């Protein structure tokens, strides 16, 4: 009797393993610590191991793709719009698809604390849900360095005011600056954008031009600065790198209301560094390398959970 029970349990376990292997779901998140309202991009990989082509589509009862998010104490976090829809998708046997989804506008995860994230796929053909392992992320807040409220120019967007805040956030190996743009009267966050590395020995500068575009100058590396320009709604206009010349670069306002960087030697932050070669004995001393960097692009809110 005991032998029969053990055999039955073993057969059931093999069925569960087989079912679990029909579709594999995996998720990746760049890091475990995020600032409130910062884009939290989750990359989901779905692999069809069922032995046949699968047509993935929502049913009246089940969404074929979604996320299960809960707090550290197990409280589930529902999506902002529970009636979201996913476009149907066909996935061939052995095929792997990957999509990157910004969770910030989809789920209310702006409160401080730890969240556990899991992706889930439902196949109506197999009649089962398949889930990824859980990943934990912590939501925190940066340290406010500068804040200023300005008016919205006519025709530039809804609302009467925008509050621009520069935040510093300490990661594992470096400190990063963020720009947050919000309408405090309406309670709307337009962006929380990562500006890049920040050396804490100096305070960043923030000035507004005649159109109330914000200009930020930060010390991003030794003798290297980054000048970022954003419009009234937090959309990036331009980023330009500067090296220190005879004096430290700084922002200045011209008579026409424009903002310029003074005492800086411009360089392209998107340029690829030149290939290094070993110097010959008769070469002149090798100059200092030009600092290079690339700003993190703003993640866009998807039209649906699996949009490209």
Image (cartoon, helix red, strand yellow):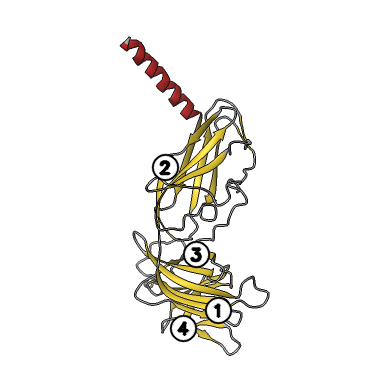
Mark closer to the chain start, 2 or 4: 2
Label 4 environment density (alpha carbons within 10 Å; few <14, some 14–19, many ≥20): some
Which numbered tag is attached to residue 134? 2
Q: Residue at x 44, y 25 (%)?
A: 16
Residue 215 in the image: x percent, y percent?
A: 52, 76
Which numbered tag is attached to residue 192? 3
- Report how far apart the C-alphas of labels 4 and 1 lie in the structure: 27 Å
Mark closer to the chain start, 2 or 3: 2
Residue 234 in the image: x percent, y percent?
A: 56, 68
Can residue 40 be seen from the camera position used here?
Answer: yes
Residue 245 in the image: x percent, y percent?
A: 43, 81
Determine the secondary structure under disc 3.
Answer: strand
Determine the secondary structure under disc 2.
Answer: loop
Which numbered tag is attached to residue 263? 4
Determine the secondary structure under disc 1.
Answer: strand
Q: In this view, does 143 lie above or below 203?
A: above
């Amino acid at each position: 009797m005991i032998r029969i029970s053990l055999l039955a349990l073993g057969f059931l376990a093999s069925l569960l393993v087989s079912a679990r292997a029909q579709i594999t779901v995996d998720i990746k998140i760049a890091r475990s610590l995020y600032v409130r309202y910062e884009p939290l991009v989750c990359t989901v990989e779905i692999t069809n191991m069922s032995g046949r082509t699968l047509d993935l589509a929502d049913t009246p009862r089940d969404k074929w793709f979604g996320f299960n998010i809960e707090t550290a104490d197990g409280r589930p976090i529902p999506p902002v719009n529970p009636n979201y829809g996913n476009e149907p998708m066909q996935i061939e046997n052995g095929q792997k698809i990957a999509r990157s989804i910004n969770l910030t506008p989809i789920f209310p995860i702006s409160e401080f604390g730890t969240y556990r994230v899991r992706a889930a796929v439902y196949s109506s053909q197999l009649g089962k849900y398949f889930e990824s392992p859980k990943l934990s992320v912590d939501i925190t807040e940066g340290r406010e360095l500068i804040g200023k409220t300005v008016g919205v120019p006519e025709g530039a967007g809804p609302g009467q005011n925008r509050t621009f805040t520069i935040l510093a956030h300490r990661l594992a190996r470096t400190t990063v600056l963020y720009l947050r743009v919000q309408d405090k009267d309406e309670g709307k966050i337009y962006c929380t954008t990562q500006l890049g590395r920040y050396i804490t020995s100096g305070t960043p500068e923030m000035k507004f031009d005649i159109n109330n575009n914000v200009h930020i100058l930060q010390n991003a590396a030794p003798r290297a600065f980054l000048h970022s320009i954003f419009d009234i709604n937090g959309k990036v206009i331009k980023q330009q790198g500067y090296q220190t010349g005879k004096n430290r670069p700084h922002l200045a306002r011209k008579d026409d209301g424009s903002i310029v960087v003074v005492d800086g030697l411009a360089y392209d932050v998107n340029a690829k560094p030149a290939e290094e070669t070993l110097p010959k004995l008769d070469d002149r001393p090798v100059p200092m390398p030009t600092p290079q960097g690339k700003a993190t692009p703003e993640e866009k809110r998807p039209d649906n959970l699996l949009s490209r």
